[in-house]
Image (tube, rainbow, N blue to C red):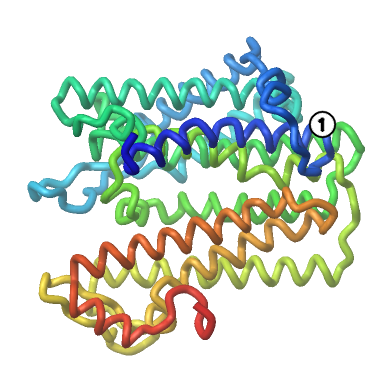
Amino acid sequence: MSRRTLGPVVLTLALPPLTYYFWLCLRDHGGALVAPSLGVLMRNVPAPTTRALALYGAWLALQIILQLWAPGRVQAGVPLADGSRLGYRLNGCVSFWISLAVVLAAVVGGVIPAGVVFDEFGPLLTTANLVACALALGLYVQGRRAGATTGDPIRDYFMGTTLNPRVGGLDLKYFCESRPGLILWVLFDLSLAGAQYERHGTVTTAMLLVTAFQFLYVADYFFHEEAILTTWDIKHEKFGWMLAWGDLVWVPFTYTIQAYYLVDHVHALSPPATAGIVVLNMAGYAVFRASNIQKHRFRRDPARPVWGRPPAYIRTATGSLLLTSGWWGIARHLNYLGDLAMALAWCLPTGLEHPLPYFYFVYMIVLLVHRERRDHAVCQAKYGADWDAYCRKVRWRIVPGVY
């Protein structure tokens, strides 16, 4: 097995069991990390229940309907290799609020219990895993029929074969990146808050903070939906198991660890602690959002003032512009620092009894450092001496004065 194939094999085989491991630690051990045998872990993987299948199937159907037919303008994406530009229907904000309204109506109408996610978490996890793996297989078959494979079936299945696979008017990568998993993340949080109320008769300050912070993050994502079209995943990553599974399983089922943990951990937060966590989250949000918007606007209009002054930049030999003023003159990825501040703020309300609720923060450090390194290597190869000049101008990678 080649080195290029080994990584995809390990990740495909290891990540799904990891999600079950986290869930079992939360469900059976109060969030404590334990070391169950592989046999115990496998025996505790639940089959999809009828209710889980119905809920997840209805959810996907709703999101597809909204993506295709909810009102929204069509925006051209970035130019492809052949110079063409695909159209994307930007109706995520409308879809987000309609989705919340539909689920709220179902809860108020008694169709589903408010805390159903807590009861069906395992079966829903299995259902989502099956859907993601089946989608990746379908994408591989589609790529094979189109002659887009590389000859390495394992890597093609994992990384994908096509940059922008579409079924009719549905762009599969854009849809999965921005709809089912992200909105489900918010709904899982809200349902877990409902479960806490059902079990303990209260929704704690800690639960309110986690739910509100993550709600803001996702709502903001859809409010600035146009910016999605210039992200790395949409522009450069092919769509295979890695992105499909990450969107449909990893996001809603691991980003909600804090909310799941808090269902049965009803500790109190002092007013100073609450205020400090809110300040940390909002400071991280401000840096994250302002820096991302600044770069997005610079890409759209390089003459637009940055912090009230003409933007400073390096013009590369390829014609690309590297912004060196504003947030992007402080660090090459200061937006990642905002991400990390928010990640820590989402974990702190859980207290310090167990490390598992802090997995998201640790994961984000690894993810963003790896992403920054990968981006650095790509830009070094693309821009050469111009990139070296940029790095001398903007010395710090993510954390000014540290890294």
Residue 190 image offset from top left, x and y in percent: 70, 40
User: Residue 169's image quarter?
Assistant: top left
Q: Is residue 346 left or right of residue 384?
A: right
Residue 363: quadrant of the picture: bottom right
Name the residue: 39% across, 42% down: 91
10 Å crowding of disc 1: few (<14), some (14-19), many (20+): few
Q: Is residue 44 above or below residue 159?
A: above
Q: Is residue 243 visible in the rendered structure shown here?
A: no
User: Which quarter of the rendered picture does the N terminus lie within?
Assistant: top left
Residue at 68%, 34% (x, y): give it. Answer: 21
- The amino acid type found where label 1 is placed reads Asp
Query: Residue at the location (78% across, 70% down)?
Result: 275
Q: Position of residue 365 (x, y in %)?
A: 55, 61
Residue drawn at x 75%, y 37% as measured from the top left:
35
What secondary structure is found at the residue carrying circle 1? Answer: helix
Q: Identify which residue, 39 or 269, lies in the foreground.
A: 39
Horizontal arrangement in the rendering, residue 104 relative to residue 141 (left or right): right
Q: Position of residue 221 (x, y in %)?
A: 48, 53
- Give x and y (percent) for residue 366: 53, 58
The residue at the far left in this view is 82
Q: Quadrant of residue 259?
A: top right
Identify the residue position indicated by label 1 in the image: 28
Number of numbered discs overlaid on the protein picture: 1
Q: Residue furthest top?
A: 50
**Left or right side of 160 for 61:** right
Residue 38 visible in this rendered orientation of the protein: yes
Residue 272 vertical placement versus 73 (above, below): below
Residue 185 vertical placement versus 57 (above, below): below
- Pick whichever, 40 or 259, lies toward us: 40
Residue extending furthest front?
1
> Front-most of 132 and 94?
132
